[in-house]
Amino acid sequence: MVDSEMVLTGQTMAYTFYCIVIILLVAWFSIKVTGKGDSLPVKPGLFYTFTAFLAVLGVSLHLITYNTIPWAEMDLNRDEYKPDKTFVIKVKDHQFIMPSEKLVINVNDKVLFDVQSEDLTYGFGLFRKDNSMMFQMQVVPGHRNDLLWHFDREGVYSIRSTEYSGPKGINMVLKDAVHVIPEGSAN
Amino acid sequence: MSFINTLIKGEGGLFKPESLTPMQKLLLRFVVVGLIYYGFVIIEGMLMRVYEIKPFPQISESQFFAILTAHPLVGIFGSTYSIVCGAFLFVVPFLMKKPLWSIKMGNWTFLLITIGTFIFWFAGFVSHYSPLYTLYWPLPADFTQFSVWGGTFFIVGIALIMVGTALFIINIFKTITYTPEGWDKQPAGKLLASALGLVAAKNLFSSKNEEHLVPLPVAAVARGSVDMALNTATILFTGVLILVYMVAAILGFDLKESAIDALLYKNWFWWGLDLIADGLVLIFVAGTWYLLAMMITGKPLFMQNIARAALLLELVVSWTVWSHHLLSDQAQPGMLKVVSGELVTAFELITQGLAFFITLATLWSARPLKMTPPLKFLLGGLLGFALAVPAGIMQADVGLNRILHNTQWVVGPHVHVAVLVGLTMTLYSAIYLLFPIVTNGAKMYSEKLVTIHFWCHLTGGIGMGAFMGIAGLNGMLRRTLYFNGEFSLLMILAAICGTLLLTGFLVFFYNIVMSVGLKGVIGIFTPAKVKTKDLVPAN
């Protein structure tokens, strides 16, 4: 199954390819525009084709991600899903107040994280052992901050606040706080 | 000419500050102050970069975040606003072929932006007030973390800049519409309609084309100024709101922070703030590209009517895109996320893409061109936005935002490449182009140094953005610190690129000082001896 690591790899490749192409294009233009040759007017047809290309590109990006990134649809329609587990986490005075010391999840569980701030705006993110991000959301006081996530593989994850909440916020890290264990294992 | 002589009198002794008109002095003052604040920003950036590699004891964590708070604001207001306001106060009357409505008001804009920037920077430096530019409620009023007095001065500094900005906007619109003494009555309403793009929109749907009374770059300035006005009102209102809490705290009252809804506030503030990032910056930049392309080639702009209409579209887009900043806010309605956050934001790919194409097509129409400093930097600026805008479109996606929001990706390939490569190189292009006009024929000290400046800035800016982007894709957050060297290698590489940027700036600054001389720099700040409302001396 596609997970956030794979999405990031795809994005890295696509954007790197684009960067190389656009840098080469501007370099080519710079050489050509200063080189010998006649000044040929650009045809309006080319302009309109380019405009249409941009419109298609802009819309298709979202269509592609909506249909290929598994959490996109689930996130927008999360009220229609029934979570296998729900964890209510409170945040106050730059501290995560957890329902238990470790959050244990079975592979293939759909888990709802319901994070409630009692003072400032914080963030809530899960990070892998190599520090890469699994997902994040904002935690706004006075509002429902719920994120539904499908865990499709085993792993141990740390929780970190992903939003600045003053200098005290840099210590908002709970190392190895989430354990995803094999399907059917007791927790 | 000896080195010392050149350092004092400038290259060939050609720059004579006593020959400058009040308008030339006004522009040069804006530019000098803008460049000094740009120097602040680069030094702050380097300090923070080194701190991100390994925190060092000379700077405390609270000081780091105070620098992080001041850094973008000094960059936007102290540097960019200064240069942009100065340039447009000169360029609008230049293109309209009439004097600026009020030089006095222009001088007030200069003073308020300069002093306001220093006040908020100094307040942050002394008190470590650091709610960041985002000011997420109720952080700015969290007096358990921040000094109320520091915060008060900080907000007052920002408010002064906003007042200066308001004066700039009045001056621009009055200059477009007023009738100078001794002139036939100007059609103010028609001029305004042309400036705002209503004529261009009408022409798109009419077989009979109405004449544009206002040159295209002036229309861009006018439309960007609309966003600037709305943004000024938003920030001023927000500032007053925060000040109410601060004054109450000073008087010993604790106003309940929760009286303000944090999400509503976030929507309000991002709506206003985005009028800079996704509004006036893009519109001003497109207008500047058009002006530069026309001045470099001496040819009319390609698809001029479409370009005018696109500027109007960009204005409307900029009012409706703010929700892409709230894609990770789960309480934000899904409809707003998709329509405003994704779809309307994607329009920026179109509007900025069109500006990119139109500028290149205009340059192409005049080939072969000479690779002059303005052309070189213009192409760099175009490349910067071509790299940064798609990076922004990618993060403005419900799926991708879940793993990109608040990472170094946002601030690297998107923000820093847009600002440092796209915007700054466009401004450098304008500076190199206008330099002989506003200095009455002074000569650049060294063309070789211009080339060094160009390559240092371009490679440094793109490189820094790239390494920050890689760090972001690997999970490195912005607005936080890492203490175990998790991303040190990438930050070292970004710092090397930052050093290139710093080198480029120092080379540029040295080149400019050697061009006008120390005497010339001082002369810019003395009262003008030439008493005229003309932009440049008559003879």
Image (cartoon, coloured by chain):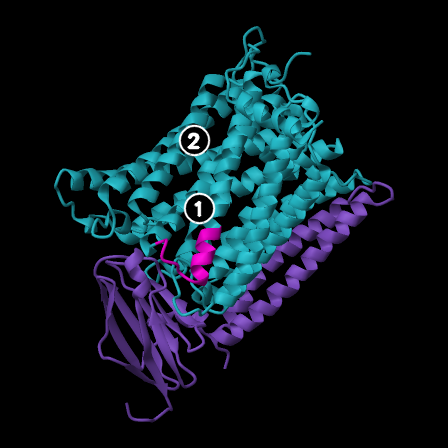
Please name the color used to draw chain A.
purple
Magenta residues, start to end: B46-59
Please name the color used to draw chain B.
cyan
Residue B466: image quadrant is bottom right
Find out whether residue A4 is within the magenta segment. Answer: no
Classify 10 Å Cα crowding around label 1: few (below 14), some (14-19), many (20 and above).
some
Amino acid at circle 2: Thr
In the image, taking residue B32 as reference, residue B291 lies left or right, namely: right
Find out whether residue B51 is within the magenta segment. Answer: yes
Residue B480: image quadrant is bottom left
Closest to the observer, A134 or B354: A134
- Image point (57%, 34%), residue name: B220
> Which residue position is annotated with label 1?
B72
- Image point (51%, 35%), residue name: B34
Q: From this viewpoint, is residue B526 visible?
A: yes
Helix, strand or loop under label 2: helix
Helix, strand or loop under label 1: helix
